[in-house]
Amino acid sequence: MTMEQFGPFIPLILLFGIFYFLLIRPQQKQQKKRQEMIKSLQKGDRVVTIGGIHGVIKEIDENIISLRVADNLNLKFARAAVDRVVEDDA
């Protein structure tokens, strides 16, 4: 094949390259970072769930965490329901 036959495909290849570097790659990095955060959860961490519930991890299992959200009120969530870990402002 000559360069003239590749001509119509060059814009398509460039578009895919731009799409990969602007959308796919950053999303993969973000997913990897989230998985690492979920794996590193520990008892006593202050977290926020994807539903917006704030609490402290009291028990942690392979797939389930128990959050203390108020005095004598513990809620169980799937581990994947944790959105982020809240850092103390001490």
Image (cartoon, rainbow, N blue to C red):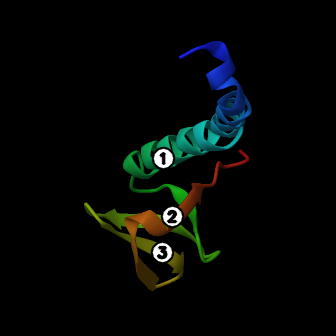
Residue pushed farthest left?
62
Q: Which residue is mark 3?
A: 68
Residue sticking out furthest to the bottom: 73
Image depth: mark 2 or mark 3 in front: 2
Amino acid at the residue labelled 1:
Met
Residue in the foreground of this view, choosing between 17 and 59: 17
Task: Report the disc number at residue 37.
Answer: 1
Q: Which residue is under mark 2? A: 82
Total labels drawn: 3
Which structural element holds mark 2? strand
Distance (Cα) linking label 2 and label 3 = 13 Å
Residue 42 placement, left or right of 47: left
> Comparing marks 3 and 1, which lies closer to the viewer?
1
* Vertical order, 70 against 17 (above or below): below
Instruction: Please rate how many residues cluster around mark 2, counting C-alpha atoms within 10 Å: few if below 14, some from 14 to 19, many from 20.
Output: many
Depth check, front residue: 50 or 9: 9
Residue for point 48% across, 75% down: 68
Marks 3/1: CA distance?
Answer: 19 Å
Q: Are the two marked residues, 3 and 1, in contact with CB atoms closer than 8 angstroms? A: no
Mark 2 in CB contact with mark 1 (< 8 angstroms) = yes
